[in-house]
Image (cartoon, rainbow, N blue to C red):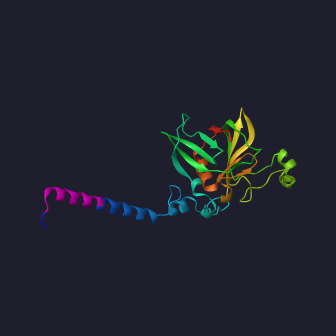
Amino acid sequence: MIMDDGAKATELMNRRSFLVASAAVVGAVGLAGCTSLEGMSRAEAERVYGPLPDERFAVPAVNLNKVDPKYLRRTVRYASTEAVGTIIVDPRHYYVYRIEGDGLATRYGANVGRAGFLWSGDAYIGRKAEWPVWTPPREMILRQPEAAPYANGMAPGLDNPLGARTLYLYQNGKYTLYTIYSTIMPETIGKGVSSGCVGLLTQDMVDLYEKTPVDTKVIVLPS
């Protein structure tokens, strides 16, 4: 069949449209076949949140079915004038950010204090510890008598509330009684469960701990 120039142009456009549409369908099928966890593939999440067998107490892998994917670690855009390394706690949205510079931050999902135990303000890391002893404050023992047996300290271990790593928040040389600690309970991430402290999955806390020296600035935003 012989086509004039106008018909040829129309046919060419139709073919181009078909190729573009076909490419879009193929791309959509490819994306559908890749299980994504908020910017992280399932395979990557299983690696990042896998077991830590070489720890003093072997840490189990995170059950990814028990944590909302939006709380998994990722690099995000975060406008801030704070210095690289500054930690910003956002209890309203259950996130902890580490400023990386160039408008970026590492974001970790967190659990935060229950209503009535929320604290905000500027602080700094006055001390850090691996597998610390947990000593409940006197005020906690009065509220929760079941903590009394640990008045002189609870030995490190997987059952210890502070877990594998802890960053202690200070103001003006004094411990505020608030910490950023590690937890092996993924079901607590995105919830208000603690007495004012902030918890990260152990795998995330190990990552943050290694990057955070003593004297690092911490900003806890109002809830």
Quadrant containing the C terminus is top right
| In the image, residue 113 lies in the stretch drawn in magenta | no
Q: Nearer the viewer, residue 141 or 9?
A: 9
Left or right, residue 219 beside residue 137? left
Q: Position of residue 24 (x, y in %)?
A: 36, 60
**What span is colored magenta in the figure?**
3-17
Rendered image quadrant of residue 164: bottom right
Q: Position of residue 195 (x, y in %)?
A: 76, 47
Q: How many marks?
A: 0
Rendered residue at 45%/64% (across/down): 32
Q: Position of residue 37 (x, y in %)?
A: 53, 59
Instruction: Identify the main secondary structure in magenta.
Output: helix
Task: Say if 91 sits above or below 39 in the image.
Answer: above
Rendered residue at 57%/43% (across/down): 98
Quadrant containing the N terminus is bottom left
Most extreme residue toward the top, as rendered? 172
